[in-house]
Image: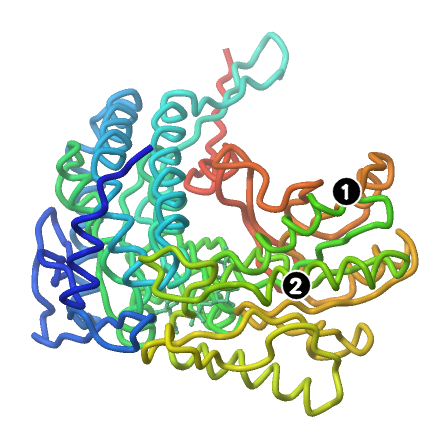
Amino acid sequence: MTLGHEPLVAEVLSTGTLKGLPQEHFIGGRYVPAHSGNTMESFDPARGRPFASFAAGDAADVDAAVAAARKALNGPWRQMGPAERGRILDRAATLLRERAARFAVVESLDSGKRLLEAEGDLRGVARAFEYYAGAADKLHGDSLPLGRNYVGFTTEEPIGVAAQVIPWNYPLSTAARGIAPALAAGCTVVAKPAEQTPFTALMLAELLHEAGLPEGVLNVVTGTGAQAGAPLVAHPGIDHITFTGSVATGTQVMRAAAEHVTRLVLELGGKSPLVVLADCDMDVAINGVIEAIYENAGQICSAGSRLILDRSIAVAFLSRLATRVKGFKIGHGLTNPDLGPVNSARQLEIIDSHVQRAIASGNRVYAGGSIAKSEAADGGWFYEPTIIEAQGASDPLAQQEIFGPVLTVQIVDGPEEALNAANATPYALVAGIYSTNITDALRFARDVDAGQVFINEWFAGGIEVPFGGNRKSGFGREKGMAGLRSYCKLKSVVARI
Ligand code: NAD
């Protein structure tokens, strides 16, 4: 499918920016400036330079957005039947497909991700709206078997105003997987995109209103976590929080939620194990590893960041993998290189500090191992695609999320040791296994602690598949019908007859 992005890419590459980006909050169905009048800048990660500014929101803007969302909860949105809500979401899916080129270019420019990946994200985002459009009028309760003298049933009611706090690695995908089910369930929303990537959430709000969403049903406030995120999650007018981000911030959000007993879903970090057994199809597994850790320069909560590899194939596997990785071209995400930049100077520093500490401790490096300095880097924030071996399961490299293009390798003997290694971190988001023995693969799926398990294809599945973590990776589920129920409150009704 050709998306017609060429003129937009040419504009960015020649001028360093794109005309017509939204610069204000979206509250009550229209763009409004920050109450304080303050703005901040967003950076092109491939050049390390600002390309546009946007509203720096604070508690006053959050108050206005929550007020708009509360008002909208009792407006036309409440009267609208589920089928009509679904129709609006379906129109949004159509508009997203029509405007995918512009959305994808903005997403790539703002986050740094390769354009091909951003285009894939757009397809997923349109699918999310389509999926929940179809689900809106199928959100039925149960009838309860209480005997002849009673009629009992349950209903699923919208939870109210749902706050969405969104990270910078999948700005639009994360927004969509929260906003689409919340709207399908009949909630209203206040979203706070990451300060590194504010634009596509604003564009999405505008598009949804064009698709027929009543004013105030979806509001977007931009700004930092401290200035705009913290007042949002602590707001008494919020009924539910979906937070996607780091464990450290998630812990603060959970504390803030406790104050008003606000419900929440936490999607936090990961250090997800990718197990490769001796009987794998090696070509499939090598491609799988490359996608799992180098997609979006490894800045994916569900990246396969720990390769747990059977010793009997380790030498051959690592040599083939390292040869592929050393041949990667890096460059601006909009030029579709093999590897794009990481999102910020801070992220680059964090990644390098993990790797340099490991190298100083004597860990073996198979590829990469430093900040990329090639000409293609052009002042941007690039890290070499890296493969580095951990020294045992307790090595910080095997325990801590790095959130960059850095693959940690752990070498094990057989499926049992692989499983033990897989389960030996505080995280439990996703896990994967490459094996041609379906029994070994399904035993691993049964015994590994993870919210989602991939067999012979990392990232297999789509919006239909519930997603979320256990342990330090958080709790609650997004996507699938489970994601829709996150935005509902269950009511039981019993009548004596
Ligand atoms: P972060 O926690 O710093 O920021 C995430 C969001 O929270 C941003 O919008 C930020 O502005 C906001 N925020 C920051 N402080 C806040 C506060 N005190 N109150 C309310 N909101 C606040 O995360 P990050 O470092 O930008 O993102 C990377 C992390 O996100 C990684 O750990 C990664 O694993 C995780 N992540 C998880 C998932 C998932 O689905 N499980 C998806 C993407 C990223």
Front-lying residue, 97 or 463 = 97
Can you tell which quarter of the image residue 293 is in? bottom right
| Element type at mark 1 | loop
Q: Quadrant of the N terminus?
A: top left
Q: In the image shown, does 121 or 32 lie closer to the viewer?
A: 121
Residue 229 tag number: none
Identify which amino acid the numbered label 2 is placed on: Thr
x and y, in percent, of residue 371 in the image: 49, 81
Kindly report which numbered mark, 2 or 1, lies closer to the viewer in this rendering: 2
Disc 1: which residue? 281
Above/below status of 388 relative to 328:
below
Label 2 crowd bin: few (<14), some (14–19), many (20+), radius 10 Å: few
- The residue depicted at 18 percent of the width and 52 percent of the height is 8
Mark 1 close to ligand 1, CB under 8 Å: no
Q: Residue at x 83, y 65 (%)?
A: 411
Please give the name of the residue rendered at 54% of the width and 45% of the height, measured from the top-left corner. 477
Q: Residues within 10 Å of mark 1 (few under 14, many from 20)?
A: some
